[in-house]
Image (tube, rainbow, N blue to C red):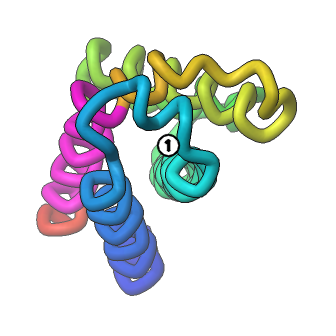
Amino acid sequence: MDRALIEEKLESLRRCLLRIEEKCPENAAALAQNIDLQDIITLNLTRAVQLSVDIAAHWVAELDNIPAPDTMGGMFESLAEYGCIDTVLANRMKKSVGFRNIAVHNYEAIDWQMVYAICKHHLSDFSNFAKVVFAALSDD
């Protein structure tokens, strides 16, 4: 992997997660009522997903004998099949792609309770992915 490029993407991912943590309100109802927080959090969540997909795509491209997946979620599946990440993390990252698709293509259908739950209970999925990527970079 291009170390400088991946480190840049990891830093962008870190900033997105920090922004979400800083702006996440105390409860889902507050998020549902605040359009500015909705925008800030949704934008940073979709960026976090996209950055993770981009990193995964670079990683998959470096692996031998792995055809490029047809979907964004498939990137994480391929990494799990090759043993780069565990299947639990791959499945969680794949689910994040589902959120991204709703946020990008059907914004009005966003469930703010779900977004709040992601912010409170699943940001660690992105952090864990970043840790695995960083460890892989260190092994190179």
The residue lying toward the viewer, choosing from 30 and 105, is 30
Identify residue type, mark 1: Asp
Position of 71 with respect to 48 (left or right) is right
Q: Position of residue 84 (x, y in %)?
A: 29, 35
36 shown above or below 6: above
How many numbered tags mark residues here? 1
Q: Position of residue 136 (x, y in %)?
A: 21, 56
Which residue is painted at 23% across and 66% down in the image?
A: 137
Span shown in magenta: 119-136
Residue 84 makes an appearance in the image: no
> How many residues crowd around disc 1 within 10 Å: few (fewer than 14), some, or many (20 or more)?
few
Position of 101 with respect to 81 (left or right) is right
Q: Which residue is mark 1?
A: 64
Quadrant where the image shows the N terminus: bottom left
Label 1 residue SS = loop
The residue lying toward the viewer, choosing from 13 and 26, is 26
Position of 67 with respect to 27 (left or right) is right
Q: Quarter-wise, where is residue 19 in the image?
A: bottom left
Position of 72 with respect to 105 (left or right) is left
42 shown above or below 1: above
